[in-house]
Amino acid sequence: MKVVRFHSPGDVRIEEAPQPQPGPGDVLIRVRACSTCGTDVKIRNYGHHHIAPPRVMGHEIAGEVVEVGAEVAGWQAGDRVQVIAAIPCGTCGECRRGRMTVCPNQESMGYHYDGGFAEHMVVPAKVLAVDGLNRIPDGVSYAEASVAEPLACVLNGQNLARVGPGDDVVIMGSGPIGCLHVRLARSRGAARVFLVDVNRERLDLAAALVHPDATVCGAETDVIDEIKKLTDGRGADVVITATAAGVAQEQALQMTARQGRISFFGGLPKDKPVIACDSNLVHYRELTIVGANGSSPSHNAEALTLIASGAVPVADLITHRLPLDRALDAFDVVARGEAIKVTIEP
């Protein structure tokens, strides 16, 4: 079978590989869709400390069960499934407290285990042990189901930031994650959603799909002033920084309303993780700053339900669909910011 395999920074190859065989507790799937994200581009360029090459990449996975291990119950050939990316251990103190997104023993598909940029993939027993293999609801395509994983991360972020009815919400970053944040905030009853980016072309592409109440281009205007104007000087109830830019986090502090919430959704570069924070703003305005890191198995299941119900449509966000042998082209499209979501269909 064909796979997309990481060997070293800058060296990702489309190769032939033997079809994997499931162990007693594993499930073998035929991958039908595996979506790409900015993380894949970062891995291609720089590698990752959790990846011991060679490694098959891809972590936004949907497919069809082909074979189940002798000890697996409840699954059979032909089942349509979505696979979690982040695999909590399920047994540590954090997991037992229900905090699976911050499991210190977490492993990941495409990092510790071969991922979904392949024709076939083994779903490890550890995934099944934490209910991380989800049935795709009727009416949801494989491509849509592959977007459940990033939507699950967005869901975790908005739960932590308590996005709810009547909120004015600012989303900073108009990539696929930003678009999903707009859609999810709408479904949670946000009064208004404003979308911010420094790239006018990318902002317009996203806005044409997700229709925020207003867009603000940071290359053309002062973002803080514009958000204050849009909110009659009050600021936003929630600001979500869906971008790896420290300046966005610093701006978020300046444009959040009293008792507002700020989600540092996008992590910063490892060599530049420190920002300037006016502690008195946080203190006197009673601001809440929360991080957001990945998703749990239950977030993935809920994301599939949101897609199936139509509460968070995702099909139109998939702007490019490419075969496996064009996966390297897909990474280039993502890197240039020419797409919202690029899905590989092996």
Image: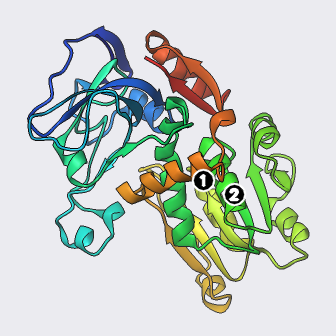
Q: Position of residue 280 (x, y in %)?
A: 63, 87
Q: Position of residue 292 (x, y in %)?
A: 47, 62
Secondary structure beneath dot 1 equals: loop
Quadrant of the image occupied by residue 214: bottom right
- Relative to 110, is 163 above or below? below
Residue designated by label 1: 242
Q: Secondary structure at mark 2?
A: strand
Q: Which mark is residue 8?
A: none
Of residue 264 and residue 211, the one placed in the foreground of this image is: 211
Q: Name the residue carrying label 2.
A: 171
Residue 317: x and y in percent read 66, 36
* Disc 1 residue type (three-letter): Ala
Q: Is residue 220 visible?
A: yes
**Residue 296 visible in the current orientation:** no
Q: Quarter-wise, where is residue 93 in the image?
A: bottom left
- Kindly indicate whether the residue at mark 2 contacts the one at mark 1 (C-beta within 8 angstroms): yes
How far apart, in angstroms, are the residues tagged by discs 1 and 2?
Answer: 7 Å
Residue placed at 83% from the left, 52% from the top? 216
Q: Position of residue 304 (x, y in %)?
A: 50, 48
283 vs 302: above or below: below
- Identified at 46% across, 26% down, the residue is 33
Residue 328 shown left or right of residue 27 in the figure: right
The C terminus: image quadrant: top left
Badge 2 crowding class, 10 Å Cα cut-off, few under 14, some 14 to 19, many 20 or more, is many
Q: Which of the marked residues, 1 or 2, is nearer the chain's N terminus?
A: 2
